[in-house]
Image (cartoon, rainbow, N blue to C red):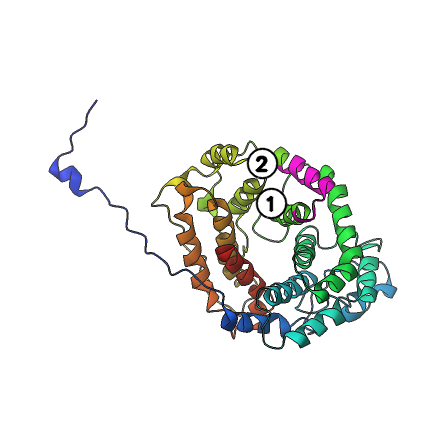
């Protein structure tokens, strides 16, 4: 059956606007030095501090530095962890980073054998066994993965010092995942797909078969039959992760390429459209610790889009969307207020890593 449109009807057809080509963001030594300044400004800054601690008695009332001698800075534990990851990543990528020797010494001071054993003891406290589940756990394993793949004498010392905490987090994942009957499909810390993605990266890098098996089993149980994820609902007002894109990026890690193609076409069918576009998360007030999360959603969307597009020619246009997201937020994090500055550098570095890996 054919359908011939009248001239009047043709006038009402709305053409899809051409999507502007974004400049691909780069990470060079100059940018690396600026990004390194962000975690350096906070990894040993104790206050302000959000402990997220459950008190068992008055004896648990201690300073952040006493409770977490390795990761007491940067406002909260997980931000301190990925602040240390940021420095490791930058040193690994740019051996001539300004103050590199001093940075290594600060890392050695914080991630000492004694300090890490104190961190392990905190997780053994009766009321804190689920502390930082799974967001902080994920970043701890990302730090361990980065140390494992850094051919450097300092890295080997740091890896050995961190190992007791790394082992603890791995064991916690393996113990916890079979108990989790339903995934958390949210845009903040407890997002299940994000926590599994970083943990899977670690397991794959170090060939930890038990952790890989636990993640593959639960991820397939949670997500394999999902379809038509509502991207139009995103982002929520204080998201820093995309529930839909984090899930897609996780399944890209787990499924064979052809199976992933079929799954993605059911899960996010609009992504294949070459004219698909996604508005950046708009930040109205970067001094508001929750509203500035939208800078984070721009970076995390970008790393997910790059992961999804990798090796799939029909999805290469997603990289342009990712670049738009990075460019929108990247310039804002330098000289930013502490509300964003204490954590956004890590998100920017990981997004930029995705562009250039």
In magenta, the rendered stretch is: 205-219
In this rendering, the answer to whether 252 lies above or below 235 is above
Which residue does the image show at 81% across and 54% down from the upper left? Answer: 127
Quarter the N terminus occupies: top left
Q: Could you tell me if residue 297 is visible in this image?
A: no
Q: Is residue 167 left or right of residue 346?
A: right
Q: Position of residue 19 (x, y in %)?
A: 32, 52
Above or below, 211 against 353 in this view is above
Q: CA distance from mark 1 to mark 2?
A: 9 Å
Residue, x 49% and y 39% (percent of image)? 229
Question: Which residue extends farthest top?
Answer: 1
User: In terms of depth relative to the viewer, which is nearer, 225 or 318?
Assistant: 318
* Residue contact at pointers 1 and 2, CB within 8 angstroms: yes
For image coordinates 65% across by 45% down, the residue present is: 204
62 horizontally vs 236: left or right: right
Q: Nearer the viewer, residue 132 or 321?
A: 321
- Residue for badge 1: 193
Q: Is residue 138 located in the magenta-colored stretch of the structure?
A: no
Whether residue 307 can be seen here: yes
The answer to which quarter of the image holds residue 164 is bottom right
Seen from the viewer's position, the closer of residues 136 and 100 is 100
Give SS at disc 2: helix
Residue drawn at (60%, 48%) of the image: 194
Q: Is residue 308 left or right of residue 148?
A: left
């Amino acid at each position: 059956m054919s359908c011939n449109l009248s001239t009047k009807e043709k006038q009402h057809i709305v053409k899809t606007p051409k999507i502007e080509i974004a400049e691909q963001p780069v990470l060079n030594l100059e940018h690396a030095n600026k990004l390194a300044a962000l975690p350096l400004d906070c990894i040993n800054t104790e206050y302000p501090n959000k402990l997220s601690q459950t008190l068992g008695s008055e004896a648990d009332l201690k300073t952040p530095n006493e409770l977490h001698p390795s990761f007491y800075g940067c406002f909260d534990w997980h931000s301190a962890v990925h602040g240390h990851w940021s420095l490791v990543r930058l040193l690994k990528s740019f051996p001539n980073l300004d103050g590199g020797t001093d940075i290594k010494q600060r890392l050695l001071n914080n991630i000492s054998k004694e300090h890490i054993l104190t961190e392990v003891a905190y997780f053994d406290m009766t009321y804190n066994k689920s502390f930082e589940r799974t967001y902080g756990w994920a970043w701890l394993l990302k730090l361990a993965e980065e140390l494992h793949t850094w051919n450097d004498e300092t890295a080997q010392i740091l890896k050995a010092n961190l190992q007791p905490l790394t082992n603890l987090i791995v064991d916690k994942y393996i113990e916890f995942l079979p108990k989790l009957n339903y995934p958390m499909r949210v845009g903040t810390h407890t997002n299940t797909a994000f926590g599994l993605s970083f943990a899977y990266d670690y397991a794959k890098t170090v060939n930890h078969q038990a952790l890989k098996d636990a993640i593959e089993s639960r991820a397939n149980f949670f997500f394999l039959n999902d379809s038509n994820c509502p991207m139009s609902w995103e982002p929520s007002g204080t998201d820093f992760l995309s529930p839909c894109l984090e899930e897609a990026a996780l399944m890209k890690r787990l499924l064979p390429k052809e199976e992933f193609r079929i799954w993605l076409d059911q899960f996010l069918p609009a992504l294949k459209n070459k004219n698909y576009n996604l508005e950046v998360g708009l930040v109205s007030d970067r001094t508001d610790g929750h509203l500035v999360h939208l800078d984070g959603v721009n970076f995390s969307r970008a790393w997910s889009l790059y992961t999804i597009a990798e090796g799939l020619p029909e999805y290469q246009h997603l990289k342009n969307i990712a670049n738009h997201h990075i460019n929108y937020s990247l310039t804002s994090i330098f000289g930013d207020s502490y509300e964003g500055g204490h954590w956004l550098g890590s998100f920017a570095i990981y997004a930029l890593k995705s562009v250039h890996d």
